[in-house]
Image: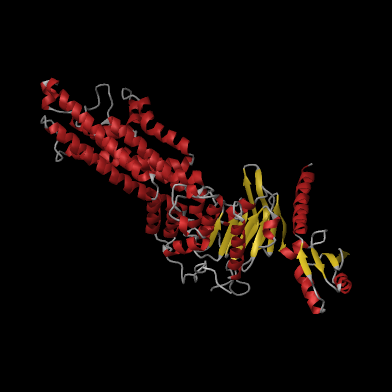
Amino acid sequence: MSGSGFPGSIDGVIEVNSATKRYGSKTAVDNLSFTVRPGHVTGFLGPNGAGKTTTLRMILGLDAPTAGTVTVSGVPFRTHRRGLRHVGALLDAHHVHGGRSGTAHLSALARSNGIPLRRVDEVLREVGLTDVARRRVGGYSLGMKQRLGIATALLGDPPVLLFDEPINGMDPEGVLWVRHLFRRLAAQGRTVFLSSHLMTEMENTADELVVIGQGRLLAAEPLARFAARSTRPSVVLRSPQADELAALLVAAGARVEPEGVGGLAVTGLPANQIGILAFDNKIVLQELTTRSASLEEAFMKLTADSVEYLAGQQR
Amino acid sequence: MTVTAAGPPPVSARPVADPPARFRDLLAAEWIKMRSLRSTPWTLGLVTLFVIAAATVEAWDSYTDFPGMNPETQREPMFALSDAFPLTGYWTLTLVAVSAGAIAVVSEYSTGLIRTTAVAVPARGSVVLAKAAVVTVVWTVVGTVIAAGSFAVSQAILSGRDASVSITDPVAVRALVASALLPPVCALIGLGLGVLIRHSATTMVTGIFALLVLPSFFSITMRWSAEINHAMVLTAWERLIAMWAEPSGDGFYRPTVTESWIVYAAWPLVAVVAALLVVRHRDV
């Protein structure tokens, strides 16, 4: 396993550096900079039309940035003659020809990159499409097409993987599977960059976040720190030693409110740190829950601000 | 704990080194794409049958009309090659080939598959070249089968009136080669237009207009107009399959054989080169 390389290595790092993309008079991405590192699932969030897909397209060299640079492992993606061993991507599950079978679609792609054809069977098995592999893709459900897109991304066994809204159209079992897959790919030391317009998709999958709005960067930080932006209690806990823990939490900089009998609602400290604090002080925890509403709220607040800011600036 | 039957891990060990980017891999990939569409064998099969059937009908008409023809025409059967390569059949072949060449790329643009392809092969010019090569080979094979078939069937019928042309006749060979090459020439023009236009219906209309409609706008009675007419693919083909052409100077301007071969080469070359230039610099 090549993994994420040694510290400071640019292997698998996605670097967006002051990238701007204009289509005519419309600016889709505006002086955007961020870095995505290997070994993590990084969520790429923003409301519809924020410029997520444009950014992914620039990473993949499909669109050339109007200004700035975008590199993967230190080089622009388009400098590669063949791409599948460097970056795997699912941009849109519909980017297939409905008249071909799943096997034919993957075989042509594998062949173009000199990837042995047995790899096609492997990825089909991995995504659970073996039984329908010989059927025409036009007859696949959206969820099946998403799985085929994921198979395409995995084909070249790449160190960097990009997925644009991969969970759309998937059934609950598929969603669970795909989350598990993303975590596993990141654990293998790969860079997993995952876009969505829904915060709820991220909370169980991503550990890093890049948030954009109106083509500009709003936040790039660990999910836990992002959650701390919320003004609402983000973690609910229950403990027989609630009073004792409340004092420790306040000392650690959190805001604490009582919630029911033996319960505390904590703002400003993520669940894992609360757990460590409780453990270090030999305090029994009976419940420790991160409230998704708070992540959603932090996201809404941030993106709403960006819209207001822009509207105010134009006046 | 039991392990669920999940197959091997999604990712095998990373390959030791990047294998070289070979053009023949792209050819193989494009060939897989072409043969994996159900419409491919149907289109090729039906158009082959149609053109050979058209030649059969033409030759049969000449066969039955033969006794009523004037003795000079009977002695010099100028119709032998135009029966083998009838306009109806070859117009249809032109239409099908230009459309098929266009669809080879436009279908990728209309479905969005082109983006999947461009991520797999960032060297987009190589993809266009590979597509062009596969389209050329497939349509040259089909064009050869059709031309040989329609020639053989028509001449077999006409030989019953002793009005056939021999395959050893240099003009017959020229007509055969020109007819066999007409579909790849048209398919490459369609492919080039497809890359430039990217939109299915617009590409088809443009291709059909340029190949089939445009020539009729330019008469051969005026010098400038004739020059444009001579630059048309179908004009070139008609000259190349003609057994004999009157020299220019009687108020009509006719293309030469050399000129016609140049037109045959220039159209697909310009189309493919334009496609290569555009595809490198344009966002996908």
State which quadrant residue B264 falls in. Answer: top left
Q: Residue A167: horizontal and vertical position, in percent?
A: 61, 55
State which quadrant residue A289 falls in. Answer: bottom right
Where is the N terminus of chain B found, in terms of image quarters? bottom right
Vertical placement of residue B13 versus A193, above or below = below
In the image shown, does B269 or B238 lie closer to the viewer? B238
Residue located at (32% from left, 36% from top): B93
Vertical placement of residue B77 versus B121, above or below = above
Residue located at (55% from left, 66% from top): A159
Vertical placement of residue A108 versus A2, above or below = above
Q: Is residue B256 visible?
A: no
Q: How is the image coloured?
A: secondary structure
Q: Is residue A226 visible?
A: yes
Residue located at (43% from left, 66% from top): B19
Q: Residue A173: horizontal and vertical position, in percent?
A: 60, 59
In the image shown, does B27 or B153 lie closer to the viewer? B153
Q: Residue B89: horizontal and vertical position, in percent?
A: 29, 33
In the image shown, does A75 or A57 lie closer to the viewer? A57
